[in-house]
Amino acid sequence: AALGDQQAIAQIGEALERGEIALSHHFIAALGRSQRAELIPYLKRGEDSAEDELKLPFAAARLDLGDSSAQATFHAAFNDPNPEVALDALDHLIPIEAEEVNQLLKRAQTTSDAEIKWYALLASVARHQAGPDKLITALNEENWEVRLWATRFSGALLADPSSSRRET
């Protein structure tokens, strides 16, 4: 499928739709990085029928393949009353290099939850979309998680802007 074999892409897509593949967010992310836009409709249908914890990975893969309609899933996550849902959404967005991600990070910074704001802002710094002075401010925050994120994203600023809260 990665080489463009349409029959293989169709078989993977149909298996995604039927839930026949043991899915993990890593596998779904790999589909997003495959540059096979033919997978978008399958990923959309898979997202529609997926368990809640797999909806964000499906949407992230679609976004990575160029499907800007996937942004709606992230907007919904940012509005979820549980802040962990929004933080999880950000974790799925950070590795994606699409311009839409920068817009979504800005959108996340408008939420009322301080941790979500900080996480999105620090991810923006690592992507060179916000000033590095924000890292200094974050390192002086009372919240230890914000300080931890500032440390991780300062390293990402120098090395890998796709770093997130997830352990690799």
Image (spheres, rainbow, N blue to C red):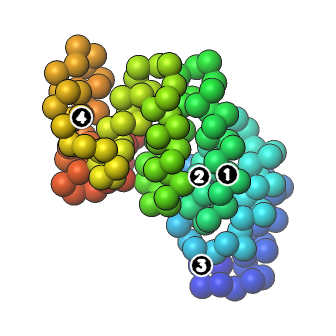
Residue type beneath disc 3: Ala
Q: Are marks 4 and 3 in contact (CB under 8 Å)?
A: no
Secondary element under disc 3, as helix, strand or loop, is loop
The residue located at (60%, 57%) in the rendering is 63
Residue nearest the observer in this picture, 21 or 92: 92
> Distance from label 1 to label 2 (Cα)?
7 Å
Secondary element under disc 4, as helix, strand or loop, is helix
Mark on residue 2? 3
Q: Crowding at label 3, few (<14), some or many (≥20) Cα neighbours within 10 Å?
A: few
Q: Against 162, is 72 above or below?
A: above
> Distance from label 4 to label 3 (Cα)?
40 Å
Mark before the other along the chain sequence, 1 or 3: 3
Q: Are marks 1 and 2 in contact (CB under 8 Å)?
A: yes
The residue located at (44%, 27%) in the rendering is 116
Mark before the other along the chain sequence, 1 or 4: 1
> Distance from label 2 to label 4 (Cα)?
26 Å
User: Which residue position is annotated with label 4?
Assistant: 134
Q: Position of residue 44 (x, y in %)?
A: 76, 55
Q: Quadrant of the N terminus?
A: bottom right
Secondary element under disc 1, as helix, strand or loop, is helix
> Distance from label 1 to label 3 (Cα)?
22 Å
Q: Against 79, is 7 above or below?
A: below
Mark on residue 60? 2
Q: Nearer the viewer, mark 4 or mark 3?
A: 4
Residue nearest the observer in this picture, 55 or 122: 122
63 left or right of 107?
Answer: right
29 left or right of 152?
Answer: right
> Distance from label 1 to label 4 (Cα)?
29 Å
Residue type beneath disc 2: Ala
| Residue 18 quadrant | bottom right
User: Which residue position is annotated with label 1?
Assistant: 70
